[in-house]
Image (cartoon, rainbow, N blue to C red):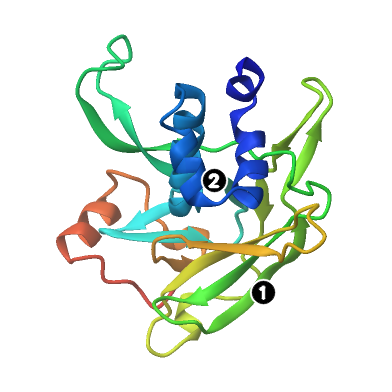
C-alpha cells in the first residue's frame, strides 16, 4: 500500500482504466490508500490546462496591450480543483477551493505529447495567425533527470490591432494534445486562452506613471492612430 501512496498519480492512471468506479468506491471504504486514490481520480474530472502567470507587455489606459516586437512567454500548467487547508499546519482545519498542479503519470507518452498556439480574434473561434504549429509539451531536465513542462517563447507575427476594422482585440489559444501509451486509448485534448489584449508597436505603450499614461487612463484608454 505504501507503494501506491508514494506513486499515487501513476497508479491513478492504471486504476482509472481498469477498475469499475463502483468497485473503486467499495475499495475506498476498506483503507485510506484507496480513498485517496479515488479522490485523485475524481479530481481529474476537473483537470484543465492553464497558462501560469500571464501578464500583458503593458497598458494603454486600463486596456492590456502586447508589444508586436517582443516575445511572449507562456508557461503551461495542468491543474485540478482541490480543497486546500487555510493553514498548512492544520490539514484537518478550514479549507478553501483552490488549484493544485498535477504531475503526469507514466501512461503519458512524453515524447509525442504536443502543444500548439494560435492568435484568435477575441471571443470567437476565428484564427488570426498560427503562432506555433506543433511543439513538444515536455523537455528532459538533465539535472533532475526527468521530464518537465516546457516554457514556450513565441513571436506575435504580422498582426497589429490598427490593421483591423474595428480595432483588433485578440487572445492566445493554447491546445494540448496528450498522447498515451495505451494502444486503444485516444488522444485527449485540452484548451485554454489568455485574457483579451491588443497588439501595438513599442512606442504606443506609455511608461507607467508618465503623462501619456495618465492621459490615457483619464480618457479611458483611447488609442492613437500610431499604435
Quadrant assignment for the C terminus: bottom left
Of the pair 95 and 227, the residue shown nearer to us = 95
* Residue 217 seen in the current view: yes
Q: Which residue lies furthest to the left in this view?
A: 218
Q: Is the residue 176 above or below the residue 207 in the image?
A: below
Q: Which mark is residue 78?
A: 2
Q: Looking at the rendering, which quadrant does residue 69 occupy?
A: bottom right
Q: Position of residue 192 (x, y in %)?
A: 50, 61
Name the residue rendered at 44%, 82% in the picture: 124
Dot 1, how many residues are within 10 Å of its Cα: few (below 14), some (14-19), or many (20+)? some
Judge from the rendering whether residue 7 lies leftward or rightward of residue 65; answer left or right.
Answer: right
Q: Is residue 41 left or right of residue 209?
A: right
User: Which residue occupies 62% across, 42% down?
Assistant: 15
Tell me: residue 48, above or below residue 132: above
Instruction: Identify residue for label 1.
Output: 130
* Front residue (pair 152, 112): 112
Distance from label 1 to label 2 (Cα)? 23 Å
Which badge, 1 or 2, comes first in the chain's sequence?
Answer: 2
The reply to whether discs 1 and 2 touch (Cβ–Cβ < 8 Å) is no
Residue at 46% across, 23% down? 31
Which image quadrant: the N terminus? Answer: top right
Q: Is residue 161 left or right of residue 135?
A: left
Taking the spot 31% from the left edge, 16% from the top edge, the residue there is: 91
Q: What element carries label 1?
A: strand
Nearer the observer: mark 1 or 2; the answer is 2
Residue 79 visible (yes or no): no
Residue 112, placed above or below residue 219 = above
Question: Which of the 4 quarters of the picture holds residue 123?
Answer: bottom left
Amino acid at each position: 500500500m505504501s507503494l501506491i501512496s508514494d506513486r499515487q498519480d501513476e497508479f491513478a492512471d492504471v486504476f482509472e482504466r481498469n477498475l469499475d468506479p463502483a468497485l473503486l468506491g467499495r475499495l475506498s471504504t476498506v483503507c485510506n490508500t484507496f480513498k485517496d486514490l479515488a479522490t485523485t481520480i475524481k479530481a481529474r474530472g476537473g483537470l484543465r490546462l492553464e497558462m501560469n502567470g500571464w501578464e500583458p507587455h503593458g497598458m494603454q489606459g486600463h486596456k492590456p496591450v502586447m508589444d508586436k516586437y517582443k516575445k511572449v512567454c507562456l508557461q503551461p500548467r495542468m491543474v485540478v480543483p482541490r480543497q486546500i487547508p487555510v493553514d498548512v499546519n492544520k490539514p484537518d482545519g478550514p479549507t478553501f477551493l483552490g488549484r493544485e498542479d498535477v504531475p503526469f503519470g507514466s501512461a503519458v507518452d512524453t515524447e509525442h505529447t504536443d502543444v500548439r498556439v494560435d492568435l484568435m480574434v477575441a471571443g470567437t473561434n476565428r484564427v488570426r495567425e498560427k503562432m506555433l504549429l506543433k511543439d513538444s509539451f515536455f523537455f528532459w531536465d538533465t539535472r533532475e533527470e526527468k521530464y518537465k513542462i516546457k516554457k514556450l517563447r513565441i513571436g506575435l507575427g504580422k498582426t497589429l490591432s490598427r490593421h483591423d476594422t474595428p480595432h483588433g482585440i485578440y487572445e492566445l489559444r493554447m491546445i494540448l494534445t496528450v498522447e498515451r501509451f495505451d494502444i486503444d486509448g485516444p488522444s485527449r485534448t485540452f484548451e485554454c486562452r489568455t485574457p483579451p489584449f491588443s497588439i501595438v508597436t513599442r512606442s504606443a505603450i506609455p511608461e507607467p506613471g508618465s503623462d501619456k499614461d495618465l492621459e490615457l487612463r483619464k480618457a479611458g484608454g483611447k488609442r492613437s492612430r500610431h499604435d
